Image (cartoon, coloured by chain):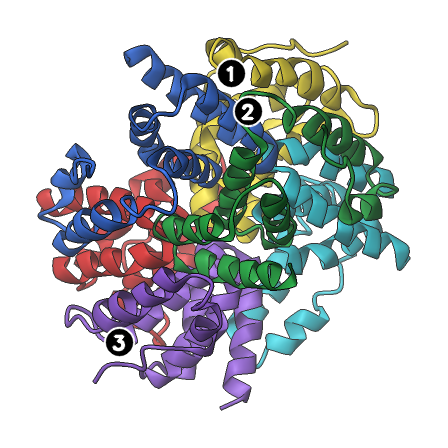
Chain colours: A purple, B green, C blue, D red, E cyan, F yellow
Amino acid sequence: MAQTATSPARERIRGTVPKLAESADTLIYGEIWERPHLSKRDRSLIVCGALMAMGRYEQLRGHLDRALTNGCTKDEIAELITHLAFYSGWPTAMTAASLAKEVFDAR
Amino acid sequence: MAQTATSPARERIRGTVPKLAESADTLIYGEIWERPHLSKRDRSLIVCGALMAMGRYEQLRGHLDRALTNGCTKDEIAELITHLAFYSGWPTAMTAASLAKEVFDAR
Amino acid sequence: MAQTATSPARERIRGTVPKLAESADTLIYGEIWERPHLSKRDRSLIVCGALMAMGRYEQLRGHLDRALTNGCTKDEIAELITHLAFYSGWPTAMTAASLAKEVFDAR
Amino acid sequence: MAQTATSPARERIRGTVPKLAESADTLIYGEIWERPHLSKRDRSLIVCGALMAMGRYEQLRGHLDRALTNGCTKDEIAELITHLAFYSGWPTAMTAASLAKEVFDAR
Amino acid sequence: MAQTATSPARERIRGTVPKLAESADTLIYGEIWERPHLSKRDRSLIVCGALMAMGRYEQLRGHLDRALTNGCTKDEIAELITHLAFYSGWPTAMTAASLAKEVFDAR
Amino acid sequence: MAQTATSPARERIRGTVPKLAESADTLIYGEIWERPHLSKRDRSLIVCGALMAMGRYEQLRGHLDRALTNGCTKDEIAELITHLAFYSGWPTAMTAASLAKEVFDAR
């Protein structure tokens, strides 16, 4: 079953950049995330790691929450952050850990 | 006619880094932005795109507003964000779109 | 008229990542670059600026050449590099200028 | 069983930065990669994704090869690249795909 | 004498990522910062510059304060920001200067 | 005494981007590097660290060589790379160490 193809952030900007929002609906969430070649759990690990490594913290929080929904455990997410600290640097890991704590505490 | 060679952000840090503020006044805004080789409208498109691509969101808001002043339309800015989403990634576009919405709504 | 929807780099990796190559064909070049909201000349300026700012030099060379085809002048590209040096830093401008020199010399 | 705690690249720079090389041996490969909280296959997916997203191509090639050794399939790696294209941008995916093709062809 | 091996940010995330926090205690602050090959003042200059250049602003504030403790003068930090503006771009310098002003004002 | 205000890389692109080359001559090397607020040795440490952290490897090689000329020792540069590995990630340190080895061997 497909994930909900929308989010509050996407709805907020839909009127400003309609083509961008539509591509997220139909292509990224409607098609890419649904492909069978990787599980949603694997995709969540990969996306959270990339967002942390690039310092895209505004999107990381929502994807950390989605990762839990997609079957990642809190221990796995903590380990992802710890592992990548050596590859993208401690600062990215500290901010990611702070966001993870907030997401975990809210569940 | 030259753009106003100052901004609240620059005035705020002038006492801390005077040479940096002076170079912004005389060189970047006093000279570079005024060169005839590209229009201010083109320079605004380029700078907004680069700030979005690099994730420099603190400066992007002010430059989105300046872009409207320099003759970019809201549709052109929305298209810039949509186009670059494929080159710098969706997360940068989502944050840029959110800032653009705020700037557009305030006009 | 649409630009050629393919390139040597894309053909090279088509067998490895077919969905990625197909999306470039049909979506990025088949649809996004063809939208009327910005001219191809404007899109080239924006993409070259973002690639330089992000340090994506492997793609910058081809896009500098495409920019000339899309109607940017050599003077405009040189000015783009000079302007963005202050926003993405001198190192990105030096490498971009070196690539631009090669592309200009080959025309 | 631990992975080989060394590599040609690490041996090459050991005399120049001995503490850096030693930390890679004992901490990153000797300890972090061996922790049970994530499989080596998962860690390879995460590291390859982060290296691609950050544009750290010099290290990506070796880690793509290691990913195959750690049990990732070529289809999974291709899907990782395709998925992340939307998050870190097409340019990072094109270069990663080119490196993946080279690694796959050499096996 | 070693610096305090802890900080509020690290304590906050210790329960979430214990191995990450422990490595910061024992390795980064317990060992790396204490090595004799560079003074703490030099290390502070280098770390503040790298954090500014990478846009890791959440960690930059604390390191600017630590730099003053480690013997950097306010003039040296202002000069670091001014110098690196040309290498990492004006936007990183503007945000760093704003943080430096806050840290300086609080002393 | 001022450093040589030119370099082979700068001469190579002078005809393509004359204003960029001139600003490097008169402003960056003619003025910024000559300011008394930080020594050239300190500026070299800071610039090499920032270039490594940003992955600007094409400029890093020349600045590592300049750092030795400006009075940094090989041990200090090795320590800079080792220290920053924890802040900008292992991949940036591995490439920087490889370049440092080449520069050191050539002296």
Amino acid carrying mark 3 in the image: Lys
Front residue of this view, candidates F77 and B20: B20
Quick check: marks 1 and 2 in contact, CB under 8 Å? yes
Amino acid carrying mark 1 in the image: Val
Chain that bears disc 1: F
Left or right for E100, reference F69 = right
Disc assigned to residue D57: none
Chain that bears disc 3: A
User: Do the residues at discs 3 and 2 belong to one chain?
Assistant: no
Residue at horizontal 83%, vertical 29%?
Answer: F37
Q: Position of residue B29 (x, y in %)?
A: 70, 31
**Which image quarter holds the C terminus of chain E?**
bottom right
Does any portion of residue C58 appear in the rendered image?
Answer: yes
Chain that bears disc 2: C
Q: Nearer the viewer, mark 3 or mark 1?
A: 1
Estimate how packed mark 2 is, as few (under 14), some (14 to 19) or many (20 or more) residues with alpha carbons within 10 Å.
Answer: many
Estimate how packed mark 1 is, as few (under 14), some (14 to 19) or many (20 or more) residues with alpha carbons within 10 Å.
Answer: many
**Residue that carries the numbered disc 2 in the rendered image:** C82
**Residue that carries the numbered disc 3 in the rendered image:** A40
Q: Nearer the viewer, mark 3 or mark 2?
A: 2
Residue at horizontal 70%, vertical 68%?
Answer: E6
Left or right for A56, reference B5 = left
Q: Secondary structure at mark 3?
A: helix
Amino acid carrying mark 2 in the image: Thr
Disc assigned to residue F17: 1
**Which image quarter holds the N terminus of chain E?**
bottom right
Q: Secondary structure at mark 1?
A: loop
